[in-house]
Image (spheres, rainbow, N blue to C red):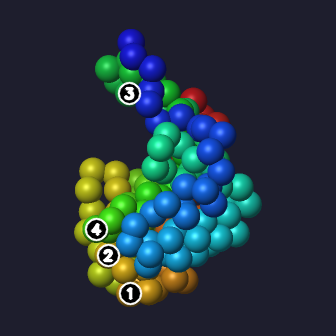
Amino acid sequence: MADAVTRPTDVPVEAFLATVEPPRRVAEGERLAELMASVTGEPPVMWGPSIVGFGSTHYRYDSGREGDMPCVGFSPRKAKLSLYGLTDAAGSDALLASLGPHTRGASCLYVTRLDAVDEDVLRQLVALGYEHHREMDASA
């Protein structure tokens, strides 16, 4: 089985964020890193070349594939902010309804502008997602 590409690296998060385009994403990335670190109590760590993650959890699919991933994280992409780990926990749908403008992927939450969403709701989603993934890891 191939190694997972997305694993923790030694790249400083600040160095990665400084390279992000457009400039608005730099500020949003810095704000998200601060917010997620504050909520989770975890330091930001680069996972692969473009994901800033907080904490770590182990997963195993029914297919037998397994690996590690951040409990929660984000990637400041050019078009949208990709937020990871915030949509899987029970109760996340109710919070998402009051978050503000966003779209969803399989396990991702996409936000075009950080200042357009309710930061208190985002904090709750981060806390809920982080605890959900830590509980899953503990029960594995």
Looking at the rendered structure, which numbered label has been put on residue 116?
1
Amino acid type, mark 1: Ala
Mark 2–mark 4 CB contact (< 8 Å)? yes
The residue singled out by tag 2 in the image is 112
Picture coordinates of residue 78, whole percent (x, y)? 33, 65
Amino acid type, mark 2: Thr
Q: Nearer the viewer, mark 2 or mark 4?
A: 4
For image coordinates 32% across by 75% down, the residue present is: 112
SS class, disc 4: loop
Residue 114 appearing in the image? yes
Image quadrant where one finds the C terminus: top right
- Work out whether 124 lies above or below 74: below
SS class, disc 1: helix
The tag earlier along the polypeptide, 2 or 4, is: 4
SS class, disc 2: loop
| Quarter occupied by residue 20 | bottom left
| Quarter occupied by residue 1 | top left
The residue singled out by tag 4 in the image is 79
| Quarter occupied by residue 108 | bottom left
Q: Residues within 10 Å of mark 1 (few under 14, many from 20)?
A: few
Amino acid type, mark 4: Ala
Mark 2–mark 1 CB contact (< 8 Å)? yes
The tag earlier along the polypeptide, 4 or 1, is: 4
> Along the line of sight, which residue is nearer the eye, 97 or 82?
82
The residue singled out by tag 3 in the image is 61
For image coordinates 44% across by 27% down, the residue present is: 4
